[in-house]
C-alpha cells in the first residue's frame, strides 16, 4: 500500500511547526526560569530530537517523490541542512568541552569538563607567558595571548593562543577564555569534537554552493515570480506619520564659537581611546540634553560653558525621557555637568603611557614646572575667559595643544584622522534625513496609491527624482559609516546604533539599484530607512565610539552581520509590500505585489541563512562552540524556518493566493522584530546589545 503524499506533507508541516513552537517556548522559559530548565525540557529533550528527525525523514521522502533529485542545487540545499543537523547531533553525543587553567611554568595533561570531572589529554600544555596587547596610548585591550609549549612524547613545539586564533592539535582546540588578575595564569576553553565539526562544516560548504546554484534553476519559484514581474508594473500604498518636538531651554553663558571649536581640537583620553575633546563634549551634551547642542549653541560651546560658567548652567533643565522620570536620573545628569566643571573627565595629559586630568593625583615623577603647568593651564584659560580676553585664552589653548603633541606624539591621531572625526561629529546624527525620509515616503506612498488605483504608470520624472534622492542618501550614509569605520578602526557593526544605520544603508542601496525597474520600492525604502535612522538616533542617542572588543575583531563577524542586516532590511521591505498588497483591491496589482514579495523573500532567506551559519563558524573559531541555543541564535533559526514555508509554494497551495502571501509577509516579519528588538530588549543573552 502506497502512502499518499498528503500524509508526508502534513507530517512535515506539523513536525516543523512543532520545532518552531518548541524553540519559541524555550526562549521564554530560559528568560523566566533559566537556561538549565530550557535545555532539560526542550533543547536536550528526546521529543525535540524526534520532531527534528520526523521533519527530516518525511521532508526528504516528499522531496524525492516530487522529483527534487532532478534539480541538483535544490537537492543539495536540503541535504546541506540534513548534514548540518547530523553534525550538531554528533557534537552533542560525542564532543568533550571544558576549561584548562594554567599557571606560568606549569604543564597540564588534563582539563576539567563541564561536570568538573577530569578529562585526560594525550599531550601536555605548559604556559610560558600571558600578555595583553593594548590599543596604542590607551588601557583598552586589543588582544589577549597565551604563549604555550605543547609536549607530545618526543615532539615539542611552542605556539601562541589568542582571540580568534585558537590552537588546534590532535582533534583538540584551545581558545583564549580568561586570565588571572596577576597575569601569571591563563584559562583556556577546550573543545574536543573531531567528527561533529567536520560534518557540520561539510554541510555549510554544501549550503553555500547550493544557495548560489539555486538562482540558476529555471523551474524555481523565484525565477517564476521574476518572470511574471518582467511583464507587468506594480506599485504600493501606505501612510505613516512622524513628529519631532524639542523642549524649550534657557541656556547659560557660553564662549565664542571659534574659541570653543579650537578647544574641541584638543585631545583627551575618553572611553578607551584618544579622541578630540569635541567628541567627549558631544556625547556628554547628548546625555544631558538629548541633542548635540541647545538654542543654536554647539556641543563645545555648551561643554565649555559648563567648564567656565558653571553657575549660569547649574539651573538649566536636563532632558528626561518618560522612562527616565525620577529624581535619581535627573541628579545623575546634573552630576555629569559637575564632573565637567571639576575637570575630572578631562584626561588631557599623558605621563608614562597613562592619561591624567588636572584634578587627578599626578605621579611624583613629574617635574615641578610640568606639575605647575598641568595644574594651572585650564585655570589660566578660565581666567582669560572670565575677563573676556579670548585671544589670550586662545594662545594658552594653543600652548596646551603643543604640549600634548610633544608628550604623546607617538600615539596621537593624525591630522587627517582628526578632520575625519570632526566631520563625523558634524554629520553623524541623521535626525534631519530621518524625518525628511519618513515625510517623503508618506508623500510617495499616497502618490503611488493614486496611480495604482487608476492603473497608470508612475511618471518618469517622479522615478528619476526617486533615483537621485536614493543615490544621494546612499552616498551620505556611506560617508557616515565610512567615517565611523575610519575613526574607530573597526567596521561599524558592533552596536545597536550601527546595526540600524546599516539597515538604512542597505535599504538605500536596494533603492538605488532597483528603483528604475521596480518603482514600488521607493516609498518602502524611504520609510524603512527613515524609521531605521530614527530608531538609531532616538533609541541610542548616538552611542559613543569605542575600541572593539578583541573577540569581535574578525572578518567573519563583519560578513555575518552584513548578511543578517541586509536580510532584515529585505524582510522589512517585504512586510511593507504586503501591507500595500492588502490595501490595494486591484487583482492584477495584488498579484504583482505578491510576486515582488517572493522576489524579495527568496534572497532574504538565503542571506539570513548564510549569515546565521557564518555566525556559527565565527563562534566556533572564537570560542569553540558553533551553536549554544542563545536566544538570538534560536530566533534566527525560527525566522529561517518560518520564512522557508514561502519557498515551497509548489507544495503549499496557500502560497498561490496573493492575499495569503501578503498576510504571510506581514505576520512573519514579527519573527524578525523579535529576533532583533525582542531579544535585545526582553529575552537577553550573549547577543543582546540594544
Image (cartoon, grey):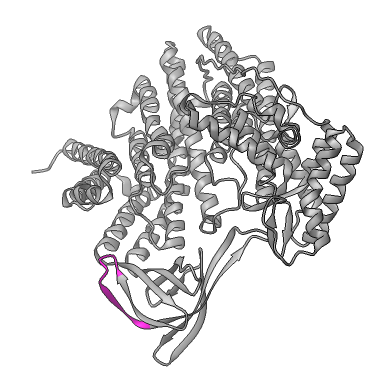
**Residue 542, quarter of picture:** top right
Which residue lies most toward the bottom here? 154
547 magenta-colored: no
Quick check: 590 left or right of 245? Answer: left
Residue at 69%, 57% in the rendered image: 355
Q: Is residue 5 left or right of residue 522?
A: left
- Residue ID at (81%, 59%): 370
Residue 289: image location, x then y, percent:
62, 28
Looking at the image, which is closer to me, 342 or 488? Answer: 342
* Residue 469, image x, y percentages: 68, 25
Of 332 and 484, nearer the camera is 332
Q: Is any atom of residue 192 visible in this view?
A: no
Considering every residue shown, the one lying at the far top of the view is: 454
Task: Residue at 70% x, 47% y: name it.
Answer: 346
Q: Tell me residue 232's x, y (percent).
A: 52, 21
Give the quadrant of residue 251.
top right
Report the number of discs: 0
Tell me: residue 53, above or below residue 123: above
Residue 85 in view in this figure: yes
The quadrant of the rendering that contains the N terminus is top left
Q: What stretch is highlighted in magenta?
A: 113-123
Coordinates of residue 644 in the picture (x, y in percent): 35, 38
As drawn, 373 above or below 97: above
Q: Going by the image, does 590 lie left or right of 544? A: left
Residue at screen point 74% across, 55% down: 349
The relative height of residue 482 versus residue 674 in the rendered view (above or below) is below
- Magenta highlight: main SS: strand
Amino acid at each position: 500500500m502506497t502512502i499518499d503524499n498528503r500524509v508526508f506533507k502534513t507530517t512535515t508541516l506539523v513536525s516543523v511547526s512543532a520545532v518552531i513552537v518548541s524553540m519559541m517556548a524555550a526562549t521564554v522559559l530560559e528568560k523566566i526560569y533559566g537556561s538549565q530548565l530550557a535545555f532539560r525540557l526542550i533543547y536536550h529533550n528526546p521529543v525535540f530530537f524526534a520532531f527534528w528527525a520526523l521533519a527530516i525523514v518525511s521532508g526528504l521522502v516528499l522531496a524525492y517523490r516530487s522529483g527534487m533529485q532532478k534539480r541538483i542545487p535544490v537537492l543539495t540545499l536540503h541535504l546541506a541542512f540534513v548534514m548540518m543537523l547530523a553534525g550538531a547531533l554528533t557534537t552533542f553525543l560525542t564532543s568533550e568541552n571544558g576549561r584548562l587553567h594554567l599557571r606560568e611554568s606549569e604543564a597540564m595533561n588534563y582539563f576539567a569538563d563541564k561536570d568538573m570531572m577530569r578529562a585526560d589529554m594525550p599531550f601536555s600544555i605548559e604556559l610560558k607567558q600571558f600578555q595583553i596587547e593594548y590599543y596604542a596610548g590607551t588601557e583598552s585591550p586589543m588582544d589577549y595571548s597565551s604563549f604555550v609549549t605543547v609536549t607530545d612524547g618526543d615532539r615539542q613545539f611552542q605556539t601562541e593562543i589568542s582571540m580568534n586564533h585558537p590552537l588546534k592539535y590532535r582533534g583538540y582546540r584551545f581558545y583564549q577564555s580568561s586570565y588571572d588578575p596577576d597575569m601569571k595564569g591563563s584559562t583556556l576553553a577546550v573543545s574536543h569534537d573531531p567528527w561533529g565539526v567536520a560534518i557540520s562544516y561539510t554541510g555549510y560548504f554544501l549550503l553555500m554552493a547550493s544557495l548560489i546554484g539555486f538562482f540558476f534553476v529555471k523551474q524555481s519559484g523565484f525565477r517564476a515570480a521574476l518572470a511574471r514581474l518582467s511583464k507587468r508594473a506594480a506599485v504600493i500604498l501606505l501612510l505613516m506619520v512622524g513628529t519631532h518636538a524639542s523642549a524649550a531651554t534657557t541656556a547659560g553663558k557660553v564662549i565664542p564659537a571659534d574659541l570653543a571649536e579650537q578647544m574641541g581640537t584638543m585631545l583627551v583620553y575618553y572611553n578607551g581611546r584618544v579622541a578630540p575633546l569635541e567628541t567627549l563634549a558631544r556625547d556628554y551634551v547628548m546625555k544631558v540634553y538629548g541633542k548635540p547642542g541647545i538654542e543654536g549653541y554647539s556641543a563645545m560651546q555648551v561643554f565649555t560653558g559648563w567648564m567656565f560658567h558653571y553657575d549660569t548652567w547649574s539651573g538649566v533643565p536636563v532632558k528626561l525621557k518618560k522612562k527616565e522620570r525620577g529624581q535619581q536620573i535627573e541628579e545623575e545628569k546634573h552630576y555629569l555637568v559637575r564632573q565637567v566643571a571639576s575637570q575630572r573627565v578631562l584626561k588631557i595629559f599623558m605621563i608614562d603611557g597613562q592619561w591624567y586630568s588636572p584634578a587627578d593625583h599626578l605621579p611624583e615623577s613629574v617635574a615641578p614646572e610640568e606639575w605647575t603647568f598641568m595644574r594651572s593651564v585650564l585655570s589660566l584659560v578660565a581666567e582669560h575667559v572670565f575677563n573676556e580676553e579670548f585671544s589670550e585664552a586662545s594662545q594658552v589653548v594653543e600652548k596646551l595643544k603643543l604640549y600634548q603633541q610633544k608628550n604623546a606624539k607617538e600615539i596621537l591621531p593624525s591630522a587627517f584622522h582628526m578632520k575625519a572625526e570632526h566631520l563625523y561629529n558634524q554629520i553623524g546624527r541623521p535626525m534631519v534625513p530621518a524625518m525628511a525620509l519618513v515625510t517623503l515616503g508618506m508623500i510617495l506612498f499616497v502618490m503611488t496609491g493614486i496611480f495604482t488605483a487608476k492603473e497608470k504608470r508612475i511618471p518618469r520624472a517622479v522615478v528619476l527624482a526617486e533615483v537621485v534622492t536614493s543615490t544621494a542618501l546612499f552616498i551620505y550614509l556611506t560617508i557616515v559609516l565610512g567615517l565611523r569605520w575610519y575613526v574607530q578602526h573597526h567596521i561599524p557593526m558592533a552596536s545597536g546604533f550601527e546595526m540600524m544605520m546599516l539597515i538604512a544603508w542597505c535599504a538605500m542601496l536596494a533603492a538605488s539599484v532597483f528603483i528604475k525597474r521596480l518603482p514600488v520600492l521607493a516609498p518602502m525604502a524611504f520609510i524603512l530607512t527613515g524609521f531605521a535612522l530614527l530608531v538609531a538616533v532616538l533609541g541610542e542617542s548616538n552611542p559613543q565610539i569605542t575600541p572593539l572588543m578583541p573577540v569581535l575583531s574578525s572578518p567573519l563577524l563583519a560578513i555575518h552581520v552584513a548578511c543578517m542586516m541586509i536580510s532584515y532590511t529585505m524582510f522589512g521591505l517585504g512586510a511593507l509590500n504586503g501591507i500595500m498588497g492588502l490595501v490595494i483591491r486591484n487583482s492584477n496589482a495584488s498579484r504583482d505585489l505578491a510576486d515582488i514579495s517572493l522576489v524579495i523573500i527568496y534572497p532574504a532567506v538565503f542571506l539570513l541563512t548564510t549569515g546565521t551559519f557564518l555566525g556559527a563558524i565565527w563562534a566556533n573559531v572564537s570560542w569553540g562552540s558553533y551553536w549554544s541555543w542563545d536566544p538570538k541564535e534560536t530566533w534566527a533559526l525560527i525566522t529561517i524556518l518560518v520564512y522557508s514555508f514561502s519557498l515551497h509554494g509548489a507544495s503549499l497551495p496557500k502560497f498561490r493566493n496573493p492575499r495569503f502571501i501578503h498576510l504571510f509577509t506581514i505576520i512573519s516579519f514579527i519573527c524578525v522584530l523579535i529576533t532583533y528588538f525582542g531579544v535585545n530588549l526582553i529575552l537577553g543573552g550573549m547577543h543582546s546589545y540594544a
